[in-house]
Amino acid sequence: MICVRMNVTLIAFSAAIAYLLGGLSTGMRLFGAEADWRPSRSLGIGLGFAGLLLHAIFLYIGLFTAAGLNLSFFNALSLAAWSVAGLLLVSSLSKPVENLAILALPLAAIMVLLDLRFPGSHLLGENAGWELRIHVLTSMLAYSLLTLASAQAILLAVQDNHLRRHHPGGFIRALPPLQTMESLLFEMISLGFVLLSVALGTGFLYLEDMFAQHLVHKTVLSIVAWIAFAMLLWGRYRFGWRGRKAIRWTLVGFMVLMLAYFGSKAVVELILRR
């Protein structure tokens, strides 16, 4: 048992180190002076994939138990962080989104270590219906994509601020053009919105009594977040919303969505101990 625990600890720390090195490599490439040596783009991505693989092994050990799927609070956070990192790294093979690694990879490293330090048990039994399984899967993917969208919005805000002040430094020059960054943002939001819609739809299929199931806050906040993203996409289509208005709506929707899932989950599991 001690040997197994040591192996799990080694895997978790190795994953965290690989993630941190991947984020550091990306940061050095973005923020380093032109005269300095800069790591290659492929180095940061490669280190990220190494962390992703080790993180997957760590998650497999903690998530899949004989009694069912363990979706405790920190396990769920770790799984969401893994999904974010995975979507980012796979997308970076064909799109210029690897700059988001400076936020996503260190965050994933922190989630791995928190999951290692605070193990818990909140089982999704093997008898769970297909609606619940699809709900869990699409929820995680939606949260992951919209998390990436919020990180993209933050970078877009920094880029927009620098350009408005006429300070297009090395960091800004390393980013794709503003229009490309904005297009990527709305691609992420559009797909995330579709997945969130599926997650809400399948969630209502197994919702019987939201008060008895302690799902009132989660349900209401998820709907509010869905409305926020729907209004953002409508505003983009109808009125051409962009820039700061799009960034604000993205971050508001993201914060409400995170409160819906992880805020409610923290209250139920960590405070109410249910």
Image (spheres, rainbow, N blue to C red):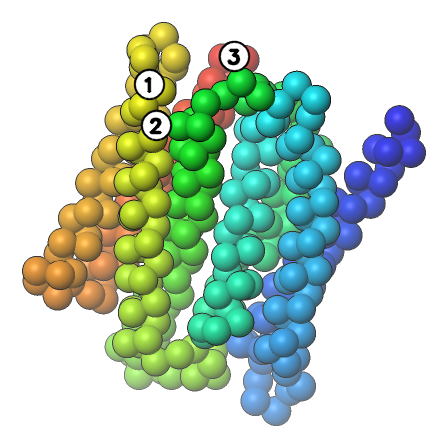
Which disc, if any, is residue 274? 3
Does residue 115 lie above or below 189 as drawn?
Answer: above
* Nearer to the camera, 171 or 105: 105
Residue of label 2 = 203
Q: Is residue 102 left or right of residue 51?
A: left
| Amino acid of disc 3 | Arg
Q: Is residue 56 left or right of residue 150?
A: right
Residue of label 1 = 207
Q: CA distance from mark 1 to mark 3?
A: 18 Å
| Amino acid of disc 1 | Leu
User: Can you tell which of label 1 and label 3 is closer to the viewer?
Assistant: 1
For image coordinates 68% across by 38% down, the residue present is 60
Element assignment for label 1 = loop
Does residue 121 lie above or below 104 as drawn?
Answer: above
Residue 268, how many percent across, how many down? 47, 18
Which disc, if any, is residue 232? none
Query: Would you call the spot at circle 1 few (<14 residues within 10 Å), some (14-19), or many (20 or more)?
Result: few
